[in-house]
Amino acid sequence: MPHAGLELTDERRGLRLVYRATPAETGGRRLEMDWYAQPGRVTVARPHVHPAGGQETWELLAGEAGYRVAREEHNVQAPHEWLIPPDTPHVHPWNVGSGEMHVRQTITVEDPTTEIAEGVARYFETVFALSARGGVDEKGDIRDPLQSAVSIRELLMPGTWLAGPPRWAQSALFAALAAIGRLAGRKAYIPAQPEPASS
């Protein structure tokens, strides 16, 4: 389960993720994570959007980063901050420098009962767990389409949608694939570290 202080390393993709604050510690309202990326590496390459009801901010603390908001691509140096407006296609930062990039991602939600922030926290942990097994490509996409559908459907929707395809079509497609995935034994959340044994 994601918690403040949890540190995940993906040597294959040149990434490190540190959870600074999670919904469990903030009443479900905030998720704060520090990403560290080696030169040429990307945090999340897939363009996507978030509906209204929350806010995503980024802060570049060290190094150089590229990122995209709507159709505008930016290359910036630390220190730099930016905000992702609701319903705006965007791509998470990638390292355009020669040293390590350090960015802080903060997600805040208006209604903690939606569990959107918790889903995002679990999704990224799942991606790191799968990547350790070779189940994630260089762009951060889960290779197994059934696993991807189950994780995206249960952990990210309706707080995250792919940029481009109509949401009704995405909802129908992911629902169908996720149903097949669950029948095939796929689970949405995969912990990157073994959960402690219950006493």
Image (cartoon, helix red, strand yellow):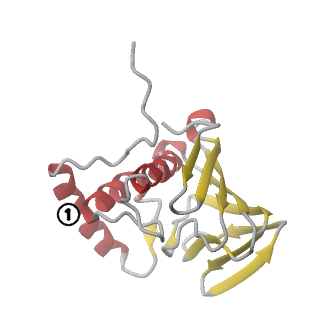
Say if residue 149 shows up in the picture: yes
- Dividing the picture into quadrants, the one containing residue 27 is top right
In the rendered view, tell whether residue 92 sits above or below residue 151. below
Q: Which of 123 and 40 is in front in this view?
A: 40
Q: In which quarter of the image is residue 134?
A: bottom left
The amino acid on which the numbered mark 1 sits, given as a three-letter code, is: Ala
Q: Nearer the viewer, residue 184 or 16?
A: 16
For the point 56% across and 35% down, the residue is: 24
Decide which of 98, 180 is in the foreground and name it: 98
In-image side of 129 versus 13 (left or right)? left
Q: Mark 1 points at which residue?
A: 176
Q: Residue at x 25, y 68 (%)?
A: 172
For the residue pair 164 and 185, the one nearer the viewer reads as 185
Q: Position of residue 68 (x, y in %)?
A: 63, 79
The local secondary structure at tag 1 comes to helix
- Residue 54 drawn at (x, y percent): 59, 57
98 versus 129 height, above or below: below
